[in-house]
Image: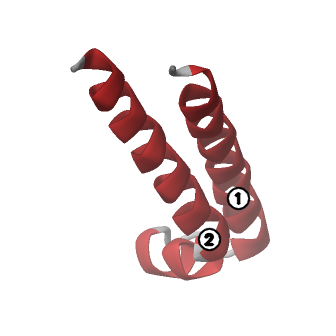
């Protein structure tokens, strides 16, 4: 039971990470109102990369 919940959390983290990496510029335009979109999109891409890596590790190390 706990393994299935852990795998589900890992899949959700990977999915969220990929969405943040792919749509960073659109999310920055929609939700943040500051002028420099490059810094905002770079920050979202870094957060998405970290989410994807953590989710991948959870999936890899859960038996």
* Residue at image coords 57%, 54%: 17
* Residue 46 location (% of width, % of height): 73, 49
Q: Which residue shows up at 52% across the image and 21% down it?
A: 62
Q: Quadrant of residue 3?
A: top left
Residue appearing at x 63%, y 30% in the figure: 60
Image x and y of residue 13, in percent: 48, 44
- Based on the displayed image, in which of its 4 quarters is residue 6 positioned? top left
Mark 2: secondary structure: helix
Q: Nearer the viewer, residue 35 or 22?
A: 22
| Crowding near the residue tagged with mark 2, few <14, some 14–19, many ≥20 C-alpha atoms within 10 Å | many
| Colour scheme shown | secondary structure
Crowd around label 1: few <14 · some 14–19 · many ≥20 (10 Å): many
Q: CA distance from mark 2 to mark 1?
A: 6 Å
Residue that mark 2 sits on: 24
Residue at the image position 50 percent from the left and 74 percent from the top: 27
Task: Say above or below: 5 vs 26.
Answer: above
Q: Nearer the N terminus, badge 2 or badge 1?
A: 2
Residue 45 circle label: 1
Instruction: Check whether the beta carbons of the residues at disc 2 and disc 1 lie within 8 A of each other.
Output: yes
Q: Is there any visible trace of residue 36 in the rendered image?
A: no
Quadrant of image for the N terminus: top left
Q: Count all numbered tags in the image, as a single digit.
A: 2
User: Relative to the observer, which residue lies in front, 23 or 16?
Assistant: 16
Pick whichever, 21 or 55, lies toward us: 55
Q: Is residue 13 left or right of residue 20?
A: left
Residue 52 % position (x, y): 63, 46
Please name whichever residue, 4 or 37, is drawn nearer the observer in this view of the structure.
Answer: 4
Residue 57 position in % (x across, y down)? 65, 29
């Amino acid at each position: 039971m706990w393994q299935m919940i852990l795998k589900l959390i890992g899949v959700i983290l990977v999915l969220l990470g990929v969405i943040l990496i792919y749509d960073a510029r659109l999310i920055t335009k929609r939700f943040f109102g500051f002028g420099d979109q490059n810094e905002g999109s770079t920050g979202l891409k870094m957060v998405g990369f970290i989410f994807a890596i953590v989710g991948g590790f959870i999936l890899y190390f859960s038996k």
